[in-house]
């Protein structure tokens, strides 16, 4: 039986030999639809997610779902918005983190729009470990930190390795 995979669902189609004459057309249709779905998204894309930033200073916190196995993913584009608030400071940042696997390790490129520290550095830094897990580090902001409203919203699109 031909197996057609759409998302995480595998569909077993009957063999054409013992089936009605229209079955080859149905199988071709289903295979074409499955290919088109893959063009829209992959199993390794990250759907829109929100992570509450409960601490003012965070070091290498995992972005849930943003783990990219280089066996399957050759690159990704993570889009995010960070909102952090304290009694005296409000920060808003939006940007992209583009990751490309170079055959040995991940290369990251980070671009954003938002406020910078007095040193010129971003308040937020992204890294990726050898397993492909994207991590966030945040610098301290002044004032009493609001651990209920401070958050990062993110999603990611991936390009597959072809494996």
Image (cartoon, rainbow, N blue to C red):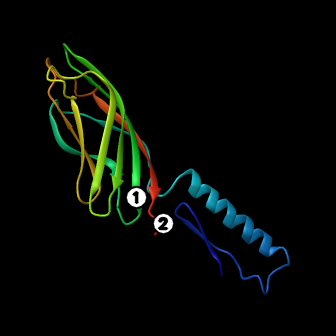
Q: Residue 93: where, in percent of width, then height?
A: 32, 26
Q: Is residue 67 left or right of residue 130?
A: right
Quadrant of res 24: bottom right
Q: CA distance from mark 1 to mark 2?
A: 9 Å
Q: Residue 3: where, in percent of width, then height?
A: 61, 75
Q: Residue 39: where, in percent of width, then height?
A: 58, 54
Quadrant of res 71: bottom left
Q: Is residue 15 left or right of residue 111?
A: right
Instruction: Say which residue appears at 37% left-offset and 35% top-offset.
Output: 80
Quadrant of res 51: top left
- Residue at disc 2, secondary structure: loop
Residue 117 versus residue 59: which sits nearer the camera?
A: 117
Q: Are marks 1 and 2 in contact (CB under 8 Å)?
A: yes
Q: Residue 19: where, in percent of width, then height?
A: 80, 82
- Kindly tell me whether residue 79 is visible in this rendering: yes
- N-terminal of the two: label 1 or label 2? 1
Bin the neighbour count of mark 2 within 10 Å (Cα to Cα): few under 14, some 14-19, many 20 and up. Answer: few
- Kindly tell me whether residue 67 is visible in this rendering: no
Residue 99 versus residue 156: which sits nearer the camera?
A: 99
- Residue at disc 1, secondary structure: strand
Instruction: Say which residue appears at 21% left-offset and 16% top-offset.
Output: 89
Disc number at residue 162? 2
Q: Indicate whether 91 appears above or below 124.
A: above
């Amino acid at each position: 039986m031909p197996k057609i995979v759409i998302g995480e669902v595998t569909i077993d189609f009957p063999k054409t030999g013992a089936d009605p004459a229209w079955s080859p057309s149905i199988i071709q249709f289903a295979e074409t639809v499955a290919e088109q779905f893959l063009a829209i998204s992959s199993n390794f894309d990250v759907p829109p997610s929100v992570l509450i930033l409960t601490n003012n200073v965070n070091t290498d916190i995992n972005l849930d779902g943003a783990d990219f196995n280089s066996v399957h993913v050759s690159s990704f584009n993570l889009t995010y918005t960070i909102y952090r608030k304290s009694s005296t400071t409000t920060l808003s940042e939006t940007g992209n983190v583009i990751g490309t696997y170079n055959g040995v390790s991940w290369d990251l490129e980070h671009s954003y729009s938002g406020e910078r520290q007095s040193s010129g550095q971003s308040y937020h830094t992204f890294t990726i470990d050898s397993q492909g897990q994207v991590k966030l580090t945040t610098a301290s902001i002044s004032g009493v930190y609001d651990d209920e409203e401070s958050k990062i919203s993110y999603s990611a699109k991936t390009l597959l390795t072809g494996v």
